[in-house]
Amino acid sequence: MKIAVCPGSFDPVTYGHLDIISRACDLFDRVYVAVLTNPAKRALFTADERVEMLSRATAELDTVYCEKFSGLVVEYAKARGAVAMVRGLRAVTDFEFELKMASMNHYLDKDIETVFMMTSNEYSFLSSSAVKEVASLGGDVSAWVPGPVAEALAKRYSAMAGSEL
Ligand code: PNS
């Protein structure tokens, strides 16, 4: 059985992520979508909330398992029996960061490959940060994230605006 990990922050999951996850399912028998728990990186949603949103969004993909992880991604991947980590590449701007990360991970564990997939054209501009910025300013993000995620964003930002009053 070929197993892959799709690691990321997923703060929150977008249709761009879901595109990569579903395409990874065509190549691998099982895909673990792994949400990084990183106390040093301030996230809008907790790791549990992000896992919950991902689980709902991938409910129809039988071979996908969503969970959180901490520590080194190669160690997590090894513990899950994965042979590869799948990452989406949008533009040249992603390349430098991804190359560094893939090289570092290859140094740490040569048995785990990083597989890059070009993001589908319609999502080439999409990022969780852009979605958060638009949502925080009251813009419509329903074309970029699943309905429950758009609702969670609206709720979170209105709660934050309320607490600032
Ligand atoms: O969605 P992101 O923020 O681009 O995902 C980055 C992520 C979570 C894949 C990366 O930060 C990661 O793997 N962190 C775990 C720590 C680790 O293994 N670091 C070594 C590789 S640089």
Image: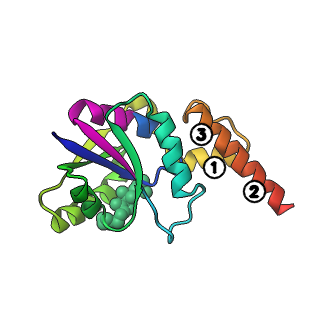
**Residue 151, x across and y down, in percent:** 67, 38
Quarter of the image with the N terminus in it? top left
Let me know if residue 32 is in the magenta part.
yes
- Residue type at tag 1: Glu
In front: 138, or 63? 63
**Residue that badge 2 annotates:** 160
Nearer to us of marks 1 and 3 is 3
Q: Is residue 111 left or right of residue 77?
A: left
C-alpha gap between disc 1 and disc 3: 14 Å
**Residue 44, x across and y down, in percent:** 60, 56
**Residue that badge 1 annotates:** 133
Residue 25 visible in the displayed image = yes
Let me know if residue 127 is in the magenta part.
no
**Residue 55, x across and y down, in percent:** 47, 40
Pick whichever of labels 2 and 3 is earlier in the sequence: 3
Pick whichever of labels 2 and 1 is earlier in the sequence: 1
Circle 2 — which element?
A: helix
